[in-house]
Amino acid sequence: MKDIENQHDLLLLVDEFYKRLLRDEDINYIFTDVVKIKIEEHLPILVTFWSQAILGTGGYTNNLTQIHLEVNKKSHLSPELFEIWLHHFNQTVDDIFAGNNAEKIKTNALNIATVLQIKIAQEKSN
């Protein structure tokens, strides 16, 4: 297996990842009912985000934390949902890629999930 090397690789990753999320009845409602994402519009944003994080390309300007705090106001993003998200993310990476960037993206995903859960908990206590 090859490592994540470019935006095309990232598109393959996020496309397959979201297919898995949307098939999982324990989490898909977040994307279909709560956020109602248009996947064809969402995937390029995700590619830009991960490309910046993993390949250093820049270009992502949205506030990731604020976006998720807004989603949480509509429907609680529980620790269990983050576990499901991370499971699918890591499994998708492992099924398609291997190497330094593959490990780096999984570490970044764990860090993001951890920070978002802390921010959600902080907002809940305010």
Image (spheres, rainbow, N blue to C red):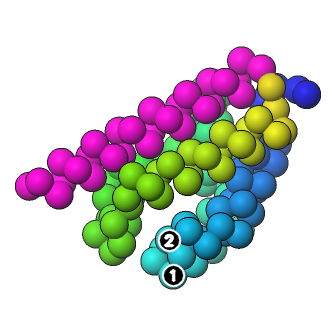
Q: Are marks 2 and 1 in contact (CB under 8 Å)?
A: yes
Please, is residue 27 above or below residue 12 in the view? Answer: below
On screen, residue 79 versus residue 28, left or right, reads: left
Secondary structure beneath dot 2 equals helix
Q: Position of residue 75 (x, y in %)?
A: 36, 72
Which secondary structure dominates the residues rendered in magenta? helix
Going 46% across and 77% down the picture, which residue do you hit? 34
Point 74% across, 63% down: residue = 19
Closest to the observer: 47 or 73? 73
Is 99 situated above or below 111?
above
| Viewer-closest of 35 and 7 | 35
Q: Residue 30 — which label? A: 2
Residue on which the image places disc 1: 33
Quadrant position of the C terminus in the picture: bottom left
Pinpoint residue 28: horizontal percent, then vertical percent.
59, 71
Q: Is residue 12 above or below residue 103?
A: below
Q: Which contiguous range is marked in magenta?
A: 99-126
The circle drawn on residue 62 is none
Measured from the top left, where is residue 113 in percent x and y?
44, 43
Q: Is residue 31 visible?
A: no
- Crowding near pointer 1: few (<14 within 10 Å), some, many (20+)? few
Q: Is residue 20 magenta?
A: no
| Residue at the (34%, 66%) spot, across then down | 76
Report the Cα–Cα distance between label 2 and label 1.
6 Å
* Left or right position of 28 against 123: right
Q: Residue at x 78, y 55 (%)?
A: 16
Q: Is residue 87 above or below residue 58?
A: below
Q: How many marks?
A: 2
